[in-house]
Amino acid sequence: MAKLTAEEKKALKGRGYVITNDGEHFIARVITVDGTLTADEMNVLSEAAKKFGNGVVAMTSRMTVEVQGIPYENIEAFDAFIGEAGLYTGGTGARVRPIVPCKGTVCIHGIIDTQALARELHETFYKGWYDVKLPHKFKIGVGGCPNNCIKPGLNDFGIMGQRVPEYDMDDCSGCKKCGVIDVCPMKAAFMNDDGLMEINKDLCNNCGKCVGACHFDCVSEKKVGYKIMVGGIWGKRQRIATVIDEVYTKEELFKMVEKALLLYREQGETGERFGMFIERIGTENFIAQLKSDEVLERKEAILAADLHTKSKATC
């Protein structure tokens, strides 16, 4: 391999080609968009791994695929080969990273279509904000239910599907065998002293298992939406995300992601993780700004430097 400068290695890493610990080969980080690949795409990656790398393909903890053992001189050929199948590398740098959804789309516990949501988030924020330089990486995790499989609370911006039950105790028939109590995994549903079923809202996590479980249809669906968690960190330093205690619609969710990114871009310090930024300016202060639309009025000014840089690059 030709001797590469630090700048050349950095540029390759920015494209998703990361040098390995032998100093001679690269891994290619291939984006999966929604955590899935088709059989044809997997065949392309398998062939590319044998043709341009060492034949090994690894899965990352964030549902991207890494083709290993690629010599420097094979990078452009590899890039062109997978590009013919619509695949591309990336997922590095101080920017919005690829979205990580759980398999809520097909899971029996899934409340929301996690993979469809991930595709929308990918187009809007991974691609749409690709040229926006943030203080540090920004990871978005999508969980389909409160089971926490992909740990949204350890992402910079965590999303969790919610199915809020609607229940009026006046509708309860006081069945001795209560279907709602039987299915509630949180033990939030219980029989009170009057022989009527109650739901402890403090214990309920909106998993939705109780909806439709009552033999007399006492529990219905009030709302399906998204819980938001901000500032989670998993690494050398950990931070459990701060929960925004509301259930949002999809339109509201996308607006909250945008506002979070704008605040981070505007007020974050270089090298500062999103969770540390929230702690520095104060959690209550951050949430107040996040719930306000004021930052959207400053959007053009906040992104001016990035838009100027992008404009120059395309001239």
Image (spheres, grey):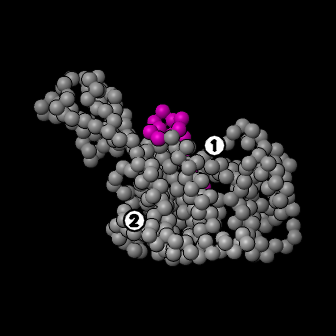
Given the image, on which type of amino acid does mark 1 rest? Thr
| Residue that sits furthest to the left in the current view | 194
Question: How crowded is the residue under tag 2: few (<14 C-alpha within 10 Å), some, or many (20+)?
Answer: few
Question: How crowded is the residue under tag 1: few (<14 C-alpha within 10 Å), some, or many (20+)?
Answer: some
Is residue 8 depicted above or below 116 in this figure?
below
Residue wearing tag 1: 36
Image point (74%, 61%), residue name: 17
Say which of marks 2 and 1 sits in front: 2
In the image, taking residue 130 as reference, residue 282 lies left or right, namely left
SS at circle 2: loop
Image point (68%, 59%), residue name: 90
Q: CA distance from mark 2 to mark 1?
A: 34 Å
Question: Closest to the observer: 226 or 93?
Answer: 226
Q: Which residues are magenta?
A: 98-112
Image point (18%, 26%), residue name: 174
In the image, taking residue 285 as reference, residue 96 lies left or right, namely right
Mark 1 or mark 2, which is nearer the start of the sequence? 1
Residue wearing tag 2: 293
User: Where residue 255 appears, x then y in whole percent?
Assistant: 45, 58
User: Where residue 105 appears, x then y in whole percent?
Assistant: 53, 38
**In the rendered structure, does residue 284 fall within the stretch colored magenta?**
no
Image point (77%, 46%), residue name: 85
Given the image, on which type of amino acid does mark 2 rest? Asp
Q: Which quadrant of the figure has residue 219?
A: top left
